[in-house]
Image (cartoon, rainbow, N blue to C red):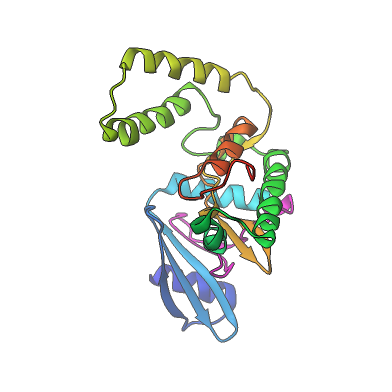
Amino acid sequence: MKELVQLFKNYTGKSAPKIDPLPSSGSNRRYYRLRQDEVSVVGVYGQSKEENHAFIELSRHFHKQRLNTPRVLAVSGDEMFYIQEDLGDSVLFDALKAGRLTGVFSTEEKEILHKTIALLADFQVLGAKDLDFSVCYPQAEFNHRSVHWDLNYFKYNFLKTTGMEFQEDLLENDFDKLSQHLLQDESDTFLYRDFQSRNVMLVDGRPYFIDYQGGRKGPVHYDVASFLWQAKANFPDDLR
């Protein structure tokens, strides 16, 4: 914690911030809000230096591209701690609560969804422009291994838990076909890889994007499918 306080002091000139823990959303990173007087930032401690480095470098690049992401304000020498712009507490997932619960999305909810998916296109194209993909972690490019990580997660954490009968050899054949299809796209575009409403903040009604440290070069349709069929979103077919 003292490392975050020191970064706060170095950046703001203030040395006695109030520190409040923030939800970690199941990740191995720890988030804190540091506030003093009118200044508020988010401090982060991440256990993986490589993952931290990816987030820091991607954030700097996206800021240059004028994309809606939090600015990284200060970083410790070992890159285990950093402070970033505070985007507040408004999360798109929460803003869509009424629609998620009823399956009927209001005009306002649809508008913010349209804004979000439109900005995704900017993220994928402008985000990839002049990006050094070698900073991405754990892999620079979406490849066969990436596809099978996801498909095996589905098999072991969903399919097998249902008790449903299926033939593993036929399932693996389908996995291979899907992998071949996904990897046909060799466009120089940025794959967010965890594009969901929990990773979109709303700042004065504008979508801002977070948790993109697992991104890499990859196909654009992956993120679109991830968003439209994300867990608990309850989007009706006509809205998709």
The image quadrant where one finds the C terminus is top right
Front-lying residue, 233 or 18: 233
Relative vertical location of residue 145 with respect to residue 78 in this rendering, above or below: above
Q: Position of residue 141 (x, y in %)?
A: 55, 29
Q: Is residue 64 magenta?
A: yes
- Residue sitting at 64 percent across and 45 percent down? 239
Residue at image position (29%, 34%) is: 162
Residue 62, magenta (yes or no): no
> Residue shown at 47%/26% (left/top)?
147
Identify the main secondary structure in magenta. loop
**157 displayed left or right of 63:** left
Along the viewing direction, whichever of 68 and 136 lies nearer the viewer: 68
**For residue 144, above or below residue 25:** above
| Residue 121 image offset from top left, x and y in percent | 71, 42
x 50%, y 15%: residue? 177
Residue 8 in the image: state x and y as whole percent: 52, 73
Instruction: State left or right for residue 112 relative to residue 3.
Output: right
Q: From the viewer's perspective, is residue 7 above or below residue 14? A: above
Q: Quadrant of residue 107?
A: bottom right
User: x, y (%) of residue 58?
Assistant: 60, 47
Q: Quadrant of the N terminus?
A: bottom left
**Residue stretch in magenta:** 63-90
In depth, the one of 3 and 221 nearer the eye is 221
